[in-house]
Image (spheres, rainbow, N blue to C red):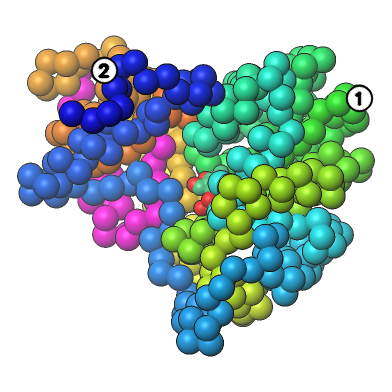
Amino acid sequence: MTSVDAITLEFNPRVMAVQPSATLAMTARAMELKRAGKPVIGLSAGEPDFDTPAPISEAGIEAIKAGFTHYTQNMGVPELRERISEKLKADNGLEYSPGQILCSNGAKQSVALAVSVLCRPGDEVLIPTPYWVSYPEMTRFAGATPVPITTSVDKDYRISAAQLDAAITENTRLLILCSPSNPTGSVYLKEELEEIAAVLRKHPHVYVLSDEIYEYVIFDAEQHSFASFDGMKDRTITVNGFSKGFAMTGWRLGYMAGPEPIVKAASKIQSQFTSAPCSITQKAGIAALEMDKGIIREMVAAFRQRRDFVLGELAELDGVRCPKPEGAFYLFPDVSGYYGKTTPQGNTITDSQDLCFYLLDEKNVALVPGQAFGDPNGIRISYAASMDDLKEALRRIKEGLSQLQ
Ligand SMILES: Cc1ncc(COP(=O)(O)O)c(C=O)c1O
């Protein structure tokens, strides 16, 4: 008997507002099947399947050997923030002093801090949908209200300036942009961002969080930092990190750059909650920014080849509609054409969760249902997997879908 009674224990109401992850049941089933010896292929990962490039790992090992294993400055060591400041200038045309840059334990912490310091109870946060799973929950935890702006496959999963204009109210506090996007891989065009910036100039009370974590995983499109558009820098928090572009998910390093009062407020919260990211990781981050980017280009070339393969296979299926994503390592096909059909086991597929469970149970392919991202018409396919796995997974997916009546 524990002293904590799970039934009567009252949590902070903000905890109750946060929804549990919609992918938990799927992950649990995939693991159960694996343990039972089934040949499960996982296309649900949100991380590169490549190892961290050697120069980065070596810098981490050197840091340990040199005893660089103590607390660092809360905002991150000056050298790392200087390298990030140079990167933002060189890649994004953005001038941020190291004092306007806060390094955190992953971009996730940066997003959480930015949302927490900016959003107040009653505020509305505009979130283009499908969205990265954490945005609405972080918003709710801050006591604010997530307001989805729905996009669809026909619009390449990008919001229009007119949609944004219609969604803004006097309570709107923040717009969260994510380009390239998780889960759709969509990349906003320069003209579209110009138009979005033009709308925001009419509404000076709205801030923007620009999540650019997939910046380096981009194919035929160009990355444009939202803060680089006219009048946007003073109201934009740019978030980026090392997880995706440098295959460093386990190292936990991300950052925000933005107006000094916002960054300082976030730094204050970070200092009381977690302190700086790991000292060893920070040294690895410096090496990542300094190394030759050839390794990254090779990784991106591999992602492009896989994207083309999976997209080509999906194009052969009548019930699937999928735009060509220009970044990240995900495809988000609309599979609603299969809803209402029946499986060989006699079950009706009503939504993407049913379809994902069917493909997992019968074909042993793990995907993520669109519900997790606020869009029940889609499924997320991560192609951060080997070509052999992708070929076999797509063979099974096609077989499974063709058996629906
Ligand atoms: C859109 C987006 N933002 C932020 C993150 C967080 O990345 P990390 O905390 O690993 O830096 C992720 C990770 O999946 C993501 O997909």
Q: Which residue is mark 2?
A: 349
Decide: is 45 above or below 149.
Answer: below
Please state which of the two labelled residues, at mark 2 or mark 1, is closer to the viewer.
1
Report how far apart the C-alphas of labels 2 and 1 lie in the structure. 45 Å
User: What x and y, as percent, mark residue 16?
Assistant: 46, 21
Which residue is more in the foreground, 231 or 61?
61
User: What x and y, as percent, mark residue 317?
Assistant: 34, 33
Can I make out residue 344 in this image? yes
Decide: is 196 above or below 14.
Answer: below
Q: Is residue 173 left or right of residue 44?
A: right
Q: Residues within 10 Å of mark 1 (few under 14, many from 20)?
A: few
User: What x and y, as percent, mark residue 108?
Assistant: 56, 46
Mark earlier in primary sequence (2, 1): 1
Which residue is more in the foreground, 256 or 398?
256
- Magenta residues span 380-405
At 35% from the left and 33% from the top, the residue drawn is 23
Q: Residue furthest left?
A: 36
Which dot marks residue 202? 1
Which residue is more in the foreground, 183 or 241?
241
Can I make out residue 153 in this image? no
Where is the N terminus found, in terms of image quarters? top left
Q: Amino acid at mark 2?
A: Ile
